[in-house]
Image (cartoon, rainbow, N blue to C red):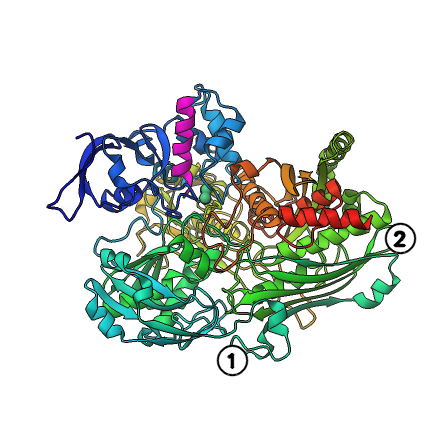
Amino acid sequence: MSVAEQDAEDDGRLAISAMINGQRRNIRVRPQQRLSSLLRDELGITGVKVGCDAGDCGACTILVDGDQVCACLMPAAQAHDKMIVSVERMATEVSLNRIQTAFHRHGAAQCGICIPGMLSAATHLLGRIQQPTEHQVLDAIGGVLCRCTGYRKIVAAILDAADPMNVAMPVLPETEVVGARAPRLDGIAKLTGQAMYGADDIPADALWLRAVRSPHARAKLRFGDLDAFVADHPGIVAVLTAADVPGHNGFGIYPHIKDQPVFANGHVRFRGEAVCAVVGERAAVEALRLEDVPVSYEPEDPVIGVAAARAEGAALVQADKPGNHLITGRVVSGDAARALETCAHVAEGHVSTAFVEHAYIEPEAGWAQRVGDRMEVHVTTQTPYMDLDEVALVLGLDKADVRIVPTACGGGFGGKLDQSVQPVLAVAAWTLRRPVACVYTRPESLAASTKRHPAEIDARFGCDKDGKLVAAEMIARFDTGAYASWGPTVAGRVPVHASGPYAVPNVFALGEAYFTNQMPAGAFRGFGVPQAAVAHEALLDDLADKVGLDRLEFRHRNALRVGDITPTGQELKASAGLARCLEVLRAPWKAALGDCERHNASDDVVKHGVGIGCMWYGIGNTGMSNPSIMRVGLGRDGRLTLFNGAAEVGQGSWTIMPQIVAETLGVPLATIDQVGPDTDRTADAGKTSASRQTYVSGTATELAAQDLLAQLRRLANAGADAEVVFDGATVRIGPAEIELARLPVRDDGFALRGEGTFDPPATALDEDGQGTPYATYAFAAQIAVVEVDTELGTTRVRKIVAAHDVGRAINPTLVEGQIEGGIAQGLGLALMEEYLPGRTENLHDYLIPTAGDVPEIECILVEDPEPTAAYGAKGVGEPGLVPTAPAILGAIRHACGASIRQLPATPDRVRAAILQQRGAS
Ligand code: FES
C-alpha cells in the first residue's frame, strides 16, 4: 500500500502498516484518531505522554522517520509506512543508550513526565548534528516544556551526550553516601518509559468519567431529566450529582473547613466547578458533547477580585462567610507605626500579583476501584494520607477502609495537594461497583485546579540613617477564590515572613484572605511568601538607595543571624546562613555591576541591569504539628527495606531517604530496597509540601535507622556506641556476630524493623503571632542579570547566581535541580505568567518558560547545618523560587529605572513604566 486504505467493513477504520519500536504493526485506525491515542490506548506504549493534546507541551514528542513529531498532532493514519520510535525503544534490555545515560548522570529527570519527549528531541538533534552548540540544543528542545528542572541539567546532558567518550553510567555510592551526587533511584524508570503515571496503568475494564463543569463564575443550577439522558445514550452508565455522594458532599484542607463540594449543590461559585459527572464506556464518554447533558444555569453577577469581595454590600460567595472574609493571620512585635515615625528613611509601596497556574505537565489523573467494602484510589498526588481522609469523608467510610496508592507524579508544585479526581472517582467506583478512571484534559486542568493566590500588598519599611532596619508594616490581601483550600495557610505564613530575612525589631503584618467567584487559590511553591518577597525586596532596594548603600551590602547589614530574634519572638539558635550567602555573592555582584555599567555606556536602547533578592523560608507547617513516620526493615538475608511514604513528585525523596539510611547504617546505597508510598503499606510521612520532606521525613528516616542499630546492639548486649557492621546475612557488633537467619521472623517477614518519628519542635502562635512557627528556616540570596529593550519593553534574563543555605546537601545534584527548577518558575512569575479564567485555559495562551527563556544558572550551596535535622539538612523546594522574581524586578529597575509593582512584568507594563519614569524625570 502506498497510502492508507479504508476498510469499509470495519466502521470506517483505515488499515495502516508501520514499524513501531522495531516491530512491523498492521493496524486499523479510526479516521480522526491521533497517533498518541493509537500508541498509548491501543498499543500500550505509555512512554508517549500526553500533557495537552494540542501540540503545546511536547510531552508526546516521538521520532517519526527520525524527525521529532508531536504524536498528539499527527493523525494515526499518517503513520502508514513510517518508522516510529518512542522512549521504550531507546534503551536495550541491559543498558541505557548514550543520551539516556547522560540524562541519568546529570540528574536531568525530576518528575520525569517530559523526559520521553526531551529524549526524542535530543535524539533528533544528535542524529543531525554530532557536536551541537548550546544554542542548537535550546532550539531542538524548544517545543518540549519542562516545569521541574529549569532545563539546565537537560541541556548539559545533551551537550555531554554529544561526546562519544561520555558513556559512563553513574554508580551508586558505597561510602560517604550523604553528600554524594548519587544518581536518582527512580531515574532509569523515568528514562525508559517504565514509570507509571496517573493515566498510564488504568485497568482495561475501567469505566471512564468526565466531569461537567460550570461555564459561569456564579449561577443557580438545575438539572433536567438525567435518567432519560442516560437511557438515550448507549454506553453511558450514569450521571452522578451531589445526590449520589454517599458521605459528606464537601472536602477541604482543614479539618473544620470542608467547604468545596464534590458536585455543586444548587449553585456554582466558579467557572470550572464540577456540577455532575458522566460515567460510561470510554468510547461513549469521549464521544459525548458535555454541553448536551441537561444542566441549566441562571447566571448571577460574580464577585471578582479582592476589592469587590470587600466592598460594602458585596454579594456573599459563601452565605455563611460575612464580608467574604476567610481568615486573617497576624504578627505584631514592637510598635511598627510609631517606630516608622522615627526612621531616617521610609519606603512604601503597593504590589499586585496575578493568579498563577502550576502547569505540571501531567494533568490530574487516576482510577479507583471498590474492593469488597474498601475503596482503593490510584492517583497522582503529593499527599496520600490527606487524600485518604477526604475519600473516607466523602464516602462516609472509616479511614481504615480507604487505600490510596500514589502513581508516579508528573509534577505537583502544590497543585496536587488538593483534591481533583479523587472524590469523584471514589463516588463513582463506590456507587457503580466498577473500576472508574478519569484523566483531566488540559483546559479542564487549567479551569478546575487551584492557583497561586493573587495578592494586593501594601507595605512600609523604615531604617535609621546608617541603614539598619527599624520597622516594617505589611498588609497582604489575598484572593482565595470560591473555597478555602490552603487560604488559611497562606494567610498564616505570609505575616511571619513579611519583614523578609532581616532583623527588624518592630513589625506589624497582616495576611487576609477573601472569597471571590474565582477558582480556589491553593498551595503553590511558597504559600504566599513569593508574593510578599516581591514587596519587601522592592522596598529594601528603595531604602538602600535612600541611604546611599549598595543593595547587597544593605541586605548584608540587616541579615538575620544566629542569636537574632524574629518577629514572632523566636531566637534563631543555629543555621541562619543568609550573611554567608551574600558574602559568596559579592564577587559576582560586583562583576555584574561593572559589566552593566560598561554595556550601558555604549547602548542607548538595550540596557543591562543587575538585581538581588533574598528570602527565608520556614520549613514545614506553620505553628502546628507535622510529623513523619518512616520504617526500615532488616531481612534475614541481610537486605534492608525502607518503607518510604514520602510522595515523590520529582524532588528526590525516593533517592535522598535511602541515602540517609545507607549513611546511618554504614552500608552501600545499593543494598537498600524500597516500598511505597501506599497507605496500606507505608506509614504517614506527611505531605510533600512546604519544603519539608528532607528535613522532617529525612530526620524520621535517620531515627528509624538508628532504632534498627539500637535493636541490634541490644541483641548483642553491646553499648550504645558499639560499631555495627553489616556483612550480608551477618551483623557484627564489636566481638559479637548475629546470624540474621537465626532470628525469628516477624509478622511482616523481617528479622528486625526500626521505626522513626520526627515532628519538628514548633509551637502554635498566639493572637499576635508570637511563638515558634518553624523549627528551622532556609535562607537564600540570588542575583539576576537582565537586559531590557527600552523601546519594546521586553526583558531577557541573562544570568542568575543563586546562593542557598540548605543546611547540608544530602545530594548536591538534586539540590541544584530544585534550585534551577524554582528559578525557572520564579522567572515565569516575574515576567510572563498570569492566569485569566476563560482566556488562558491552554498552554499556548498561558505561557510558562521554555528552554530558551531560562538563562545560565550558577548554584552556590552554603551549608550551615541545622542541629535538629538528619545530617543538618533543611529543605530547598520552595526557596529556589522565592528570591528570583524580586531579583529580576530589581534588575529591570537597575537597567532602565522602571519600577514594576504589578506582576507579571510583561512588555507593555515595562514599556509603560519606562515612559512614566521618563515623564517623571
Ligand atoms: Fe520535566 Fe518534570 S522533569 S516536567
Q: Quadrant of the N terminus?
A: top left
Residue lying at the far left of the rendered structure: 9
Residue 262 versus residue 59 in the image, above or below: below
Res. 507 image quadrant:
bottom right
- Residue 460 is left or right of residue 69, and the answer is right
Closest to the observer, 144 or 82: 82
Res. 455 image quadrant:
bottom right
Which residues lie in the magenta part? 114-128
The amino acid at mark 2 is: Lys
Q: Is residue 174 a member of the stretch shown in magenta?
A: no
Residue 97 versus residue 609 in the image, above or below: above
Q: Are marks 1 and 2 in contact (CB under 8 Å)?
A: no
The amino acid at mark 1 is: Ala
Real-space CA distance between mark 1 and mark 2, rounded to the nearest whole angstrom: 51 Å
Q: Is residue 120 a member of the stretch shown in magenta?
A: yes
* Picture coordinates of residue 431, whole percent (x, y): 26, 70
- Residue 89 is left or right of residue 134, and the answer is left
> Could you say whether the residue bearing mark 2 is in a helix, strand or loop?
loop
* Picture coordinates of residue 564, whole percent (x, y): 75, 55
- Residue under numbered circle 2: 465
Magenta: main secondary structure: helix
Badge 1 crowding class, 10 Å Cα cut-off, few under 14, some 14 to 19, many 20 or more, is: few
- Residue under numbered circle 1: 319
Of marks 1 and 2, the one in the foreground: 1
Closest to the observer, 86 or 664: 86
Badge 2 crowding class, 10 Å Cα cut-off, few under 14, some 14 to 19, many 20 or more, is: few
Q: Give the residue at x 42% y 30%.
A: 122
Q: From this viewpoint, is residue 399 visible?
A: yes
* Picture coordinates of residue 235, whole percent (x, y): 20, 62
